[in-house]
Image: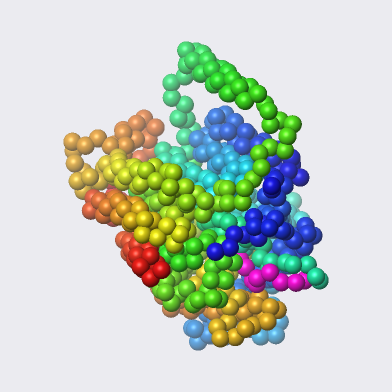
């Protein structure tokens, strides 16, 4: 159990390296967003015996770029009777919370870059995973304000659904991690990955916790089959019905960024992060390993979207409260007993 | 002895991420004013709230159902439970059986609360 | 650098608090309170109370304020205002209380002798404020408080259910509840046709 770097020996990278690594991580991961967008459309097409986009660029590879470009050239306006400043602020809040959560994802342990010891992660605070939950809590306001400030009934219904859904699944998500914390004895994601390197990937001993976290992760990102907040069949677009142009793009990008970040969390907490079992991998390959594992989960997200129908709202609520919550609680209890007995 | 500057240094990358998020969000939220068309005569229908063909009725007084109140109440309770469990779970190995008993009592009491809430039908979504 | 972040957080916190009191629309008040809580968490973080800062955001900004949002959302946009009774007497009393609070805080502040004002402030020992240290304290010094908290939450769960009148299923005529109270209020009268938007979640329930 190691305390974070700075608390132990008072070491940080020089400030320019801190900024540089943050920029690098953000740039690389944010570029995954249009790729995930494209993968979503392409794979959905294949799942439904279509080709998906093929026209823009070779094999339709530039489709996502074209989409964003199109959106940015739309007319800018604010719907009548909306609360203007909240309406503008809402997508920004969504974007900030998605981007900030990225800061705690570790891509590798401390490595040498130009002779500077650098941890390949944004921050590694002692609150670790709680950092992600804190920003997850604020993300609620992005969706909520987006729907409320539009002053349209579809947006309003969408934001109501989003609100109740987010808070219902947040508890299950938090409780499902408790077992991991008990086994590792640290909240730091770097420590969690290091533990998995030395022992075993956590999805094996924490299988139930992993399942709960996975399902709650789907619900927290508003991805199908938990996309009732958008529910285009009955709510047009849910909380972003009234949004158009770049502001819509911001909501959309934030949703995909959330999906990317949650995939990274799955990878880091339960699937060994940068670790490759039975191989003493070189440092430079570790970020690639993390991203590769992340793509497996993104593929899984899309696969589920193509396979499962959307839940009904009361099913969604009772699934979160009556199945996931007790399951996560029992998982924490059983893990506590096992950890103490086996220790 | 570490001082206040060290906190800022420790969290500097996180600040960069937040600033990038704000910047990118602001760019997305405002770029249309620069790139988008600016019609000379704004059409009234453009800014109408969406309604599929019918005149849209905008009401300032849309309200939440009371069910949300209960969900939020229960959410607070179990959220506090979770946040209490995090630090204690970290110490489970160090304290061994003692911590196990304390955690068990804590979880079981809240599980009783959960069963009560369930039995009273508060988890039925109406 | 340190001063910049301190004043950013401090001004944000004070501004949020002022907004909470001064804004007319209850919804904006709640949002101002959320802002206040987030900046307060930032102040905690600057004091190296990392766990408290995280808990502040997760529990207060992320959970308690959600309840506030729902309650304000339930009562509606509040053009009528939740102003309640206000009159000269109430104003005088509120000014008196504010003055008393100010005096009390000033006494507390001056009472410290302002010793730390020209120093670097108290030093920091490594595990202070970290979750592991908080956990250790929960299991040693504050064990009773920790266990009583779960009892308190149990009682709160009972209270929440009773308040929402689910104690004996739906509709026991002898029970009075917040639901009834709010429904009876003039605030919601005459707006029946706006609906409670409860249809979002299925059949109408109350």
Residue A84: x, y in percent?
A: 62, 45
> Which corner quadrant of the image does residue A61 belong to?
bottom right
On the rendered structure, is C122 left or right of A192? right
Residue at 32% x, 44% y is C151
Q: Is residue A49 visible?
A: yes
How many numbered marks, from 0 up? 0
Task: State yes or no: residue A111 in magenta.
Answer: yes
On the rendered structure, is B121 left or right of A4? left
- The residue nearer to you, when weighing C54 against A205, is A205
- The stretch of residues the image draws in magenta is A105-113
Q: Is residue B77 above or below residue B27?
A: above
On the rendered structure, is A25 left or right of A242? right
- By what rule are the colours in the image chosen? rainbow
Q: Is residue A138 visible?
A: no
Residue at 68% x, 58% y is A9
Residue at 51% x, 18% y is C97
Residue B92: x, y in percent?
A: 43, 59
Residue A40: x, y in percent?
A: 56, 76
Residue at 57% x, 48% y is C128
Task: State yes or no: residue B82 in magenta.
Answer: no
Residue A135: x, y in percent?
A: 56, 54
- The residue nearer to you, when weighing A233 against A323, is A323
Q: Residue furthest right?
A: A114
Quadrant placement of the N terminus of chain C: top right
- Considering the whole magenta stretch, tell me its main secondary structure: strand
């Amino acid at each position: 159990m190691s305390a974070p770097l700075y608390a132990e020996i008072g070491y940080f990278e020089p400030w320019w390296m801190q900024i540089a690594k943050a920029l690098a991580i953000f740039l690389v991961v944010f570029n995954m967003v249009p790729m995930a967008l494209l993968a979503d459309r392409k794979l959905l097409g294949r799942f439904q015996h279509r080709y998906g986009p093929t026209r823009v660029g070779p094999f339709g590879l530039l489709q996502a770029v074209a989409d964003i470009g199109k959106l940015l050239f739309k007319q800018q306006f604010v719907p009548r009777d909306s609360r203007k400043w909240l309406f503008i602020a809402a997508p920004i809040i969504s974007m900030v919370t998605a981007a900030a959560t990225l800061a705690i994802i570790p891509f590798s342990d401390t490595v040498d870059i130009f002779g500077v010891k650098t941890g390949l992660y944004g921050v590694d605070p002692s609150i670790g995973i709680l950092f992600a939950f804190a920003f997850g809590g604020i993300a609620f306001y992005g969706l909520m304000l987006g729907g409320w400030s539009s002053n349209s009934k579809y947006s309003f219904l969408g934001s109501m659904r989003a609100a109740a859904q987010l808070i219902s699944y947040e508890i299950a998500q938090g409780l499902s991690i408790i077992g991991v914390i008990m086994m590792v004895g640290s909240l730091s994601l770097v420590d969690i990955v290091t533990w998995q390197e030395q022992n075993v990937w956590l999805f094996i001993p924490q299988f139930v916790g992993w399942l709960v976290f996975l399902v709650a992760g789907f619900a927290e990102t508003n991805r199908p089959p938990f996309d009732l907040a958008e529910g285009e069949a009955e709510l047009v677009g849910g909380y972003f019905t009234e949004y158009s142009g770049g502001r819509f793009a911001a909501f959309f990008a934030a949703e995909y960024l959330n999906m990317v970040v949650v995939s990274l969390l799955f990878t880091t907490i339960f699937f060994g992060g940068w670790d490759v079992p039975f191989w003493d991998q070189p440092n430079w390959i570790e970020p690639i390993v993390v991203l590769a594992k992340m793509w497996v989960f993104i593929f899984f997200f899309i696969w589920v979207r193509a396979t499962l129908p959307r839940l009904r709202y009361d099913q969604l609520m009772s699934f979160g409260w009556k199945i996931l919550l007790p399951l996560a609680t029992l998982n924490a209890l059983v893990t506590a007993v096992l950890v103490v007995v086996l220790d | 002895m570490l001082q206040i500057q060290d906190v800022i240094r420790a969290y500097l990358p996180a600040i960069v991420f937040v600033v990038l998020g704000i910047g990118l969000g602001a760019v997305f939220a405002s770029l249309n004013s620069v790139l988008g068309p600016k019609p000379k005569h704004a059409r009234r229908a453009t800014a109408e709230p969406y309604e599929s063909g019918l005149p849209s009725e905008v009401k300032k007084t849309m309200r939440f159902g009371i069910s949300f109140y209960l969900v939020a109440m229960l959410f607070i309770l179990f959220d506090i439970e979770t946040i209490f469990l995090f630090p204690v779970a970290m110490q489970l190995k160090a304290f061994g059986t003692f911590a196990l008993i304390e955690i068990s009592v804590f979880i079981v009491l809240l599980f009783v609360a959960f069963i009560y809430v369930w039995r009273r039908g508060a988890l039925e979504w109406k | 650098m340190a001063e910049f972040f301190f004043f950013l957080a401090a001004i944000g916190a004070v501004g949020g608090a002022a907004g909470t009191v001064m804004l007319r629309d209850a919804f904006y008040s709640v949002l101002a309170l959320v802002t206040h809580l987030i900046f307060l968490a930032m102040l905690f973080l600057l004091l190296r109370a990392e766990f408290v800062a995280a808990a502040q955001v997760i529990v207060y900004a992320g959970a308690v304020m959600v309840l506030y949002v729902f309650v304000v959302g339930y009562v509606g946009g509040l053009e009528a205002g939740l102003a309640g009774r206000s009159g000269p007497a109430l104003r005088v009393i509120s000014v008196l209380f504010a003055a008393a609070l100010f005096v009390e805080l000033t006494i507390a502040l001056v009472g410290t002798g302002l010793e730390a004002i020209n120093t670097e402030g108290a030093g920091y020992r490594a595990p202070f404020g970290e979750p592991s240290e908080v956990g250790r304290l929960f299991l040693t010094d504050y064990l009773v408080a920790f266990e009583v908290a779960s009892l308190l939450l149990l009682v709160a769960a009972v209270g929440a259910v009773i308040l929402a009148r689910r104690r004996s299923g739906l509709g026991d005529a002898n029970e009075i509840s917040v639901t009834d109270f709010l429904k009876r209020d003039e605030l919601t009268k005459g707006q029946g046709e706006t609906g409670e938007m409860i249809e979002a979640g299925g059949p109408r329930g109350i």
